[in-house]
Amino acid sequence: MSSPAPEEVELLRRLIAIDSVNPALVAGGAGEADIADAVTGWLAECGFECRRLEATPGRPSVIAVARGAGGGRSLMLNGHLDTVSLASYEGDGLEPVLRDGTLHGRGAYDMKSGLAAMIVAAARAHREPHRGDVVLALVADEEHGSLGTEEVLEAVVTDGAVVVEPTGLDLVTTHRGFVWATVTVHGRAAHGSRPDLGIDAIAKAGRVLTAIDELGARLASGPRHPLLGTGNVHAGTIAGGAEPSSYPDTCAVTIERRTIPGENHITFERELRGILDDLGRADAAFSADLEITTHRGTFEADAASDLAAIAAASFRDVTGREPTRRGEPFWTDCALLQAAGIDTVMFGVDGGGAHAADEWVDLDSLATVTITLERAIRRYVG
């Protein structure tokens, strides 16, 4: 007779089987309601006080609190309930499949494994007396706009937070931010046979693209962050013109800038305005507007972060080795938590296939993360 699977594996199977596709990414996606109900029921049975947040109808997040006796620090474990599309998954993404020490299914890696680990770890820690509160933030919409974590932070702020996104068992202490901008270049509409009347907005926009490429080269040879390298920039989309026989009167270019600590949306706005001013001085017929449409800040844990030290010590107890400390090139909810004054790190499972046709988690890593989190909780909250 085979032995029963660890409780974090059983919980992960249950979570994978629940459709929680983000409807902001996929029209008609199920959203987080069903999975929010499931985790609320599981945690309530474990003695957590559960509160549902749903400022956006149909997009609930759950705050679950294990109250401490007092006198200790509070710790948040943060993970997202939503997944990307099932349509891009090869086979049935809602059917968890065990294969050679790995578990496959949509969200197995990103990040229902993290949810299972943090829920089970917190429940185990709560079985023994503890001084500080343990808070689970099970949030909506991380895959799109991070509505869930923003709403959670309006309700609760803790001393520390671990975001349990998959990190390959590395301890992530920094990541990049990003800025999106739209440059709209203006021309003058005219018949294609009348160059004396028309100004070609698309051709003028080509100069913006060349300048963006040059900015990218300057960034690549500029200041480097020890874990993140340099910032970077690229053009994302371009749109303009009505038909081949007319001079286009506008051309819009969207541009993305990835930032490192010390850079932000103001940095990028200054860079772009410098480019547009230079182009205007060189060509009296050049005219363009600039709009910063979206921006998210960088994240960098304090060098003296006690939570990072505790997470590293807990990992060392479990594995006998030091965790690799590194940065991520992409943005996460860590930045929102740190901006709220919370000592934050990111730590999670190993596996692969995020957003891909086959997604999987290494079950040994799931066990390691669960035990490490349990130890870190006990150390941090007291």
Image (spheres, grey):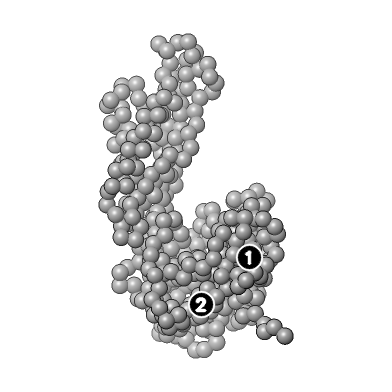
Of the 4 image quadrants, the one containing the C terminus is bottom left
Is 110 located above or below residue 116 in the figure? above
- Secondary structure, mark 2, is helix
The residue under label 1 is 104
Mark 1 belongs to which amino acid?
A: His
- Asked whether the viewer can see residue 232, the reply is yes
Q: Is residue 59 left or right of residue 313?
A: right
Q: Residue at x 47, y 79 (%)?
A: 372
Q: Residue furthest front?
A: 100
Q: Nearer the viewer, residue 110 or 280?
A: 110
The residue under label 2 is 368
Q: Position of residue 249 (x, y in %)?
A: 46, 23
Q: Is residue 181 left or right of residue 279?
A: right
Q: Nearer the viewer, residue 260 or 343?
A: 260
Q: Residue at x 52, y 89 (%)?
A: 128
Is 78 located above or below residue 377 in the figure? above
